[in-house]
Image (cartoon, grey):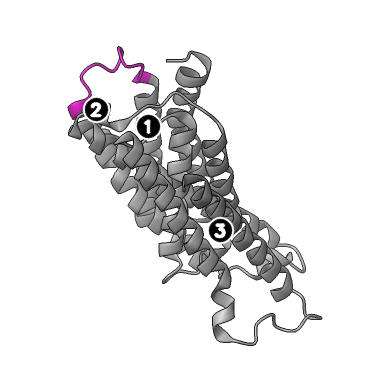
């Protein structure tokens, strides 16, 4: 059952990605007629993505049932985070024009799920922690997932800003929402992600007893620096109207620090040091 669900999820993730790529190419070509004759057909890639996410959730639920916990090994955590990112993106598409981000999010989710299915790792189960640590870990994952989407949004914003200066802009950029809309979406994602990152940091300071014994000092320091960067960016946006390249640089810098804090530490401890 797990293999069937994973295969279904991977195939529908990839199918949704291919259709999004095809639609972008068609919508930017004046020589090709509109690709849809029925209003519901334009939602096909989103229907496929929802199918992929639901199958991914069921796969994760069966794995949870077998282990009586989530598996937070390196690949297991990456697969879970990719699932949450894809789910948050689909929820955002209900009232925001962000479906083009699926071109990056969905294939990554497919790859992470394929790796989880085929690679055997030493499990790191959540039930070995108390509920306080479980809250810390889960809020960390949600924060990372939201800020992951914000980073992708910032990359698109950078490409869009650069391409709008050329004549004419590339096909993909022409299919994106206006620059102001993209910036507004970026700061909405940043605000929500910072909220969960704050909860994660506060719960970590309260509930983690010995940072040095658990090899968490570098992770904590990098996360705090990222929190400061995101907070300064949001304050700068509200007080000084920061936008454009400033917002892009600060967002990507903060996300890279979070990436190093979470996956960098897990890579060293689990893959290299086997702890």
- The residue that label 3 is drawn on is 101
* Picture coordinates of residue 195, whole percent (x, y): 29, 48
Magenta stretch contains residue 88: no
Q: Quick one: 253 or 240, which is closer to the camera?
A: 253
Residue range highlighted in magenta? 206-217
Q: Which mark is residue 223?
A: 1
Q: CA distance from mark 1 to mark 2?
A: 21 Å
Judge the density around disc 2: few (<14), some (14-19), many (≥20) Cα neighbours within 10 Å: few
Q: Quick one: 60 or 177, which is closer to the camera?
A: 60
Q: Which of the 4 quarters of the picture holds residue 118?
A: top right
Q: Is residue 23 above or below residue 220?
A: below
SS of the residue under disc 1:
helix
Does label 3 or label 2 sit earlier along the sequence? 3
Mark 3 vs mark 2: in front: 2
SS of the residue under disc 3:
helix
- The residue that label 2 is drawn on is 129
Q: How many numbered marks are there? A: 3
Q: Specify whether residue 258 is in view.
A: yes
Judge the density around disc 3: few (<14), some (14-19), many (≥20) Cα neighbours within 10 Å: many
Q: Residue at x 38, y 33 (%)?
A: 71
Mark 3 vs mark 1: in front: 3
Q: Is residue 87 above or below residue 25?
A: above
Q: Quick one: 51 or 210, which is closer to the camera?
A: 51
Q: Main secondary structure of the magenta part?
A: loop
């Amino acid at each position: 059952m797990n293999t069937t669900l994973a295969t279904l999820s991977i195939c529908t993730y990839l199918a949704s990605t291919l259709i999004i790529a095809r639609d972008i190419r068609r919508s930017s070509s004046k020589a090709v007629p509109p690709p849809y004759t029925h209003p519901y057909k334009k939602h096909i890639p989103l229907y496929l993505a929802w199918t992929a996410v639901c199958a991914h959730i069921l796969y994760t639920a069966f794995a949870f049932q077998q282990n009586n916990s989530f598996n937070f090994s390196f690949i297991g955590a990456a697969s879970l985070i990719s699932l949450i990112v894809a789910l948050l993106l689909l929820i955002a598409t209900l009232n925001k024009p962000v479906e083009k981000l699926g071109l990056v999010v969905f294939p990554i989710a497919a790859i992470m799920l394929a790796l989880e299915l085929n690679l055997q790792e030493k499990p790191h189960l959540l039930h070995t922690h108390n509920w306080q640590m479980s809250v810390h870990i889960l809020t960390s994952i949600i924060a990372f997932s939201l800020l992951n989407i914000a980073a992708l949004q910032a990359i698109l914003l950078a490409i869009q800003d650069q391409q709008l200066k050329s004549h004419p802009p590339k096909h993909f950029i022409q299919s994106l929402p206006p620059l102001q809309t993209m910036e507004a979406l970026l700061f909405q994602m940043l605000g929500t992600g910072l909220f969960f990152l704050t909860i994660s940091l506060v719960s970590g300071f309260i509930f983690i007893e010995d940072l040095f014994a658990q090899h968490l000092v570098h992770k904590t320091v990098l996360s705090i620096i990222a929190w400061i960067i995101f907070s300064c960016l949001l304050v700068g946006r509200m007080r000084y109207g920061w936008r454009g390249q400033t917002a892009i640089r600060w967002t990507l810098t903060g996300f890279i620090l979070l990436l190093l804090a979470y996956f960098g530490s897990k890579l060293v401890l689990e893959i290299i040091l086997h702890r």
